[in-house]
Every structure is written in C-alpha cells, then in structure tokens.
Amino acid sequence: ALAVGGVHHLVGFAAGLRYYSRTAPVTGDESELNAVVSMGVTVRDQLILTLTGENLVPQSGYDGAPLGVGIGARWQPTDTFAVALDTLTDLESKDDGAAVSPMLGAEYRIRDTVPVRVGWGRDGVSGQAFMTAGLGVSNAQAGLDYGAKLALVSRGKPAHWHGLSLRL
C-alpha cells in the first residue's frame, strides 16, 4: 500500500494492492490481484471520516472480491483507544441491488506499539454475522498486523478467515 498525508495531516490518501486466494476442493483454486483506494478526512481532532473504493479492477470468473464502496467513521478520544463504525456496499453480488454490510470495532493500543482489536459485522449478501479480532505491532515507519474473522453461526464445520498485512 502507498499512503500520502495531505494538508496539515487533515486529509490523507492511500492506494494498495490485494491478493485473494481461495482453495476449494469441489470448484478448484481461485486467486486474483485487485486494487483499493481510500481517502480520509480529519473533521475534528478525535473524528476521522473515510471513503474507500474496493476491488476496482474488473474480474471475470472470481466472485470473492466484488466492486464495493466503503464509508467509515473513527472516533479516537485518546492515543490508545478508538471506536469505528464502517459500512461496505457491495455493488455486484446481488441482482436486485446493492448489499450493505455494517461493521463495528474497537482498538486499544498497548504502549503505543501493540494494537489489539475486536469487532462485529454482518455480511450484507449472505446475512452471516461474524466476530473479528486482531493483534499487531507498529510504529511510525512500519506495521505488521494479523486479523481473524469467525462466523457466529455456521452450518457444518466452523467458517473462519485469517489475514496478514505489512505496512512499510
């Protein structure tokens, strides 16, 4: 990902690449490379609003990463604690219109270096609710984050996803 600070750190822009990979015994393995762009605006010292474009490269044959638009708000009353409310609107997966996925999360930073995160969300396409958790290590120059997502109700074996990100 590439990020740039704006006017007096009140506006920021970011662009990144994402690689998706899925192993499915019945349908076969699928993967894709896609792009995301984002803009954030600091409204007040403690409130940040964001707008994001997800999966901007059109894909054929891979249905796991549809075109989407995200909006979010992050309230950070201290340097160590923040609460965020986000929505991701999937513009391609449903034939009868867009599907909105709400998400809520909190972050606590230990010694300004170790972010610990927990969250909840609901997939607007499937209706599946999920919990999220994450742990990382970061400073001004770099960051490494791990995240997990667990379906709250699943039929058959438990559904879970894992992610790892590196910021340089």
Image: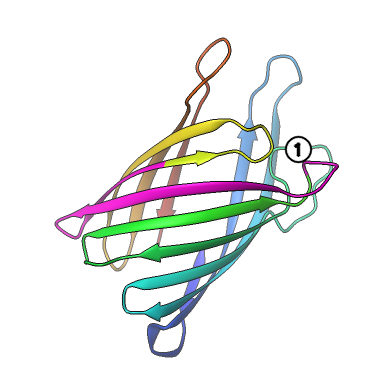
Out of 95 and 36, give the one closest to the viewer.
95
Q: Is residue 97 magenta?
A: yes
Q: Is 136 left or right of 16, judged from the image as shown?
A: left
List x then y, in percent, for residue 74: 40, 63
Q: Residues within 10 Å of mark 1 (few under 14, many from 20)?
A: few
List x then y, in percent, for residue 24: 67, 20
Q: Is 118 left or right of 91, judged from the image as shown?
A: left
Numbered label tally: 1
User: Measuring 42% from the left and 83% from the top, which residue is drawn there?
Assistant: 10
Which residues, given as a range, are shown in magenta? 93-119
List x then y, in percent, for residue 23: 64, 24
User: Measuring 53% from the left and 22% from the top, which residue is drawn there?
Assistant: 159
Out of 79 and 17, give the one closest to the viewer.
79
Is residue 148 depicted above or below 16 in this figure?
Answer: above
Out of 6 and 154, give the one closest to the viewer.
154
Q: Main secondary structure of the magenta part?
A: strand
User: Measuring 47% from the left and 25% from the top, which residue is drawn there?
Assistant: 152
List x then y, in percent, for residue 98: 75, 50
* Residue extending furthest toward the top: 156
Q: Quadrant of the C terminus?
A: bottom left
* Residue extending furthest toward the bottom: 7
Q: Is 146 left or right of 11, judged from the image as shown?
A: left
The three-letter amino acid code for the residue at tag 1 is Asp
Check disc 1 and report the residue beneath it: 63
Is residue 74 depicted above or below 44 in this figure?
Answer: above
**Colouring convention used in this rendered image of the protein:** rainbow
Q: Is residue 103 magenta?
A: yes
